[in-house]
Image (cartoon, coloured by chain):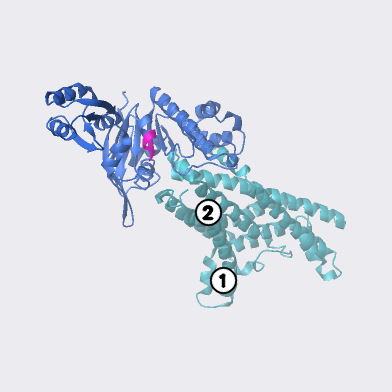
């Protein structure tokens, strides 16, 4: 039962749904907002004080950082919706039950689903980023500014793959959280609502903990959002003048863990969410009456 | 290596949901090349038993063997030789029948992929094979389920209430298909609450009620047990007395001046002679076929016919 063949079938299922296309359009819309409203409009504002910030948001290579920062937050939510829907509908349609009854092991079923959703998510995020870059080029061109990657103080071309990876890595724990919540609850609504509550609640909590003393900083340092913020801050170090529509404070590099520590903590959360999902699914009854499909 | 004659065997298979015992120590044997009917009223535990065999539910106790492979350790391997349609049809509504089958074929490999057209034709869905399944009627979805179960040419077919949603013509076609599959060497395990369907289709039958196996046997044996002779005689009471005295007569009932004698049909002449020796004469003698419904009602104690 080669995994590649199963993965191809998984991609066929996802491709035939309308939700990935809607979510992709929302991502492209978000990229447009960043570049045109957050960058281009500010660049053309009457107050000259805001022109550099607008330029940094609108023009390459800084616009990549702005796109990835906002894309990490909102992309996490949108990918969470895709993941939750992809997992829960198979429960509702009964096809998860059918796959297991046909000899696909439960671990294999979850793994193939994860790989399929990860592939589609990666393509959607990268395509939305590409659309954002295209907007950036257009906006920069219309503004009459030079289009170059050789900007002083900006990320080099060699750094771009790394900052894209950091941005993408910031999406991963939240996508896996949505996956975990949906596997446990068997419900798209629970997966999405749980993720949203977690995203917003954690952002608020991180803000509150940042104002407190005692054990608060240690607690904050262990939260996933704080560590994802560190990865985004690593992207922004040296060129932090950009607009963000992410629901969080702009990362302050001095308060954040170093990217390696952040990477380890994010990995730990990913392992936890995956572990819970696999554990529950492997032990679960998949009967009609139990909602297994 | 010879194939085991028993393709499915369960050992004390039990499932408990909280305080409710859905299945109680089920011991079943399904022989190779036979059509096995799994009968029971709604809620008797049929779907639970099938789900346990297919690994969808975790048993509270007991286990199953498929093709001699222990379900506790080698279930996925065994299930690749099984085609199943479980209650609550499962399909991808946004995909066509052909695409649905492509998805399932991915589990089995190229040979299953090559059989897609064949099974679509077999279940009569060729004309609608490219339409989205959400536009299908219930009967068409049933056919698709059967096509998916046959896709990898399985040795054992497990079908849970497979004729739900089929019209009478579809049910007849289905029965014929099952018989054909059986003649080609496949084993079919079919659960149903439709007694007539099982009687026409199955070689062996097991009856469950409230999670417990009530009996298991060959359909022909069960029907033979239900055979009787209906007769009208010159002296009903006298005839009843004479017939009850015969040791191989299983029972005699009187109703509306007629007698129903539970006895083998081939011994009708002996009954006639015994009555004639007592100066009691037959004015009418008619054999009555045994049927599964009567047997089912007798075994389960159900009063309504909708088993």
Q: As rendered, which of A247 and B200 lies closer to the eye?
A: B200
Q: As rendered, which of A264 and B187 lies closer to the eye?
A: B187
Q: Earlier in the sequence, mark 2 or mark 1?
A: 2
Q: Secondary structure at mark 2?
A: helix
Could you say which chain is coloured cyan in the image? Answer: A
Which stretch appears magenta? B189-197
Q: Locate residue A45 relative to residue B44 in the image: left or right.
A: right
Q: Which residue is mark 1?
A: A205
Q: Report the residue at 60% width, 72% height from top.
A: A207
- Which tag is nearer the camera, tag 2 or tag 1? 2
Mark 1 closeness class: few <14, some 14–19, many ≥20 residues within 10 Å: some
The disc label shown at residue A70, or none: none
| x then y, percent, for residue A124 | 66, 48
Q: Report the residue at 50% width, 75% height from top.
A: A215
Residue at mark 2 to residue at mark 1: CA–CA distance:
23 Å
Q: Where, by quadrant of the figure, is residue A176 drawn?
A: bottom right
Q: Is residue B11 visible?
A: no
- The number of callouts visible is 2
| x then y, percent, for residue A62 | 74, 58
Q: Which residue is mark 2?
A: A179
Image mark 2: chain: A
Colour of chain B as rendered: blue
State whether discs 2 and 1 lie on one chain: yes
| x then y, percent, for residue A131 | 74, 50
């Amino acid at each position: 039962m080669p995994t590649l063949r199963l993965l191809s079938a998984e991609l066929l299922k996802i491709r035939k749904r309308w939700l990935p296309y809607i979510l992709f359009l929302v991502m492209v819309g978000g990229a447009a907002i960043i570049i045109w409203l957050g960058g281009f409009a500010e660049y053309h504002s009457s107050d000259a004080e805001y022109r550099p910030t607008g330029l940094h948001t609108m023009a390459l290579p800084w616009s990549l950082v702005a796109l990835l920062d906002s894309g990490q937050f909102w992309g996490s939510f949108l990918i969470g919706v895709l993941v939750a829907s992809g997992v829960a509908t198979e429960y509702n349609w009964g096809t998860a039950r059918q796959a297991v009854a046909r000899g696909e092991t439960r671990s294999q079923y979850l793994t193939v689903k994860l790989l399929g959703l990860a592939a589609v998510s990666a393509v959607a995020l990268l395509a939305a980023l590409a659309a954002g870059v295209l907007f950036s080029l257009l906006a920069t061109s219309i503004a009459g500014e030079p289009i170059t990657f050789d900007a002083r103080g900006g990320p080099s071309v060699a750094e771009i793959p790394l900052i894209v990876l950091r941005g993408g890595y910031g999406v991963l724990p939240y996508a896996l959280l949505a996956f975990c919540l949906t596997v446990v609850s068997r419900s798209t609504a629970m997966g999405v609502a749980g993720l949203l509550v977690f995203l917003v609640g954690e952002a608020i909590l991180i803000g509150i903990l940042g104002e407190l003393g005692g054990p608060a900083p240690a607690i904050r340092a262990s939260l996933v959002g704080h560590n994802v913020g560190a990865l985004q801050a690593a992207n922004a170090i040296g060129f932090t003048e950009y607009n963000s529509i992410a629901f969080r404070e702009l990362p302050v590099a001095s308060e954040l863990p170093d990217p390696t520590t952040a990477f380890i903590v994010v990995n730990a959360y990913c392992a936890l969410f995956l572990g819970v999902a696999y554990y529950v699914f492997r032990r679960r009854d998949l009967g009609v009456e139990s909602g297994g499909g | 290596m010879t194939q085991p004659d028993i393709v499915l065997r369960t050992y004390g298979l039990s499932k408990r949901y909280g305080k409710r015992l859905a299945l109680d120590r089920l011991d079943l044997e399904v022989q190779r090349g036979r059509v096995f009917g799994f009968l029971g009223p709604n809620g008797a535990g049929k779907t639970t038993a099938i789900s346990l065999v297919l690994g969808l539910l975790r048993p509270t106790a007991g286990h199953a063997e498929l093709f001699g492979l222990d379900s506790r350790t080698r279930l996925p391997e065994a299930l690749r030789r099984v085609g199943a349609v479980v209650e609550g049809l499962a399909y991808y509504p946004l995909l066509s029948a052909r695409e649905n089958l492509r998805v399932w074929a991915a589990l089995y490999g190229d040979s299953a992929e090559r059989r897609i057209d064949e099974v679509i034709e077999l279940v009569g869905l060729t004309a609608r094979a490219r339409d989205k399944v959400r536009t299908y009627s219930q009967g068409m979805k049933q056919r698709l389920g059967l096509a998916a179960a046959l896709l990898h040419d399985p040795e054992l077919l497990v079908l849970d209430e497979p004729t739900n949603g089929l019209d009478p013509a579809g049910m007849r076609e289905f029965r014929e298909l099952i018989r054909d599959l059986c003649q080609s060497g496949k084993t079919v395990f079919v659960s149903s609450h439709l007694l007539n369907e099982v009687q026409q289709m199955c070689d062996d039958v097991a009856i469950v009620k409230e999670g417990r196996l009530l009996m298991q046997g060959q359909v022909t044996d069960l029907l033979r047990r239900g055979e009787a002779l209906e007769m009208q005689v010159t002296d009903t009471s006298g005839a009843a007395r004479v017939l009850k005295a015969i040791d191989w007569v299983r029972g005699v009932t009187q109703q509306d001046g007629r007698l129903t004698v539970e006895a083998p049909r081939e011994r009708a002449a002996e009954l006639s002679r015994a009555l004639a020796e007592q100066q009691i004469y037959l004015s009418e003698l008619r054999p009555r076929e045994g049927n599964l419904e009567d047997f089912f009602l007798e075994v389960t104690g159900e009063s309504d016919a909708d088993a």
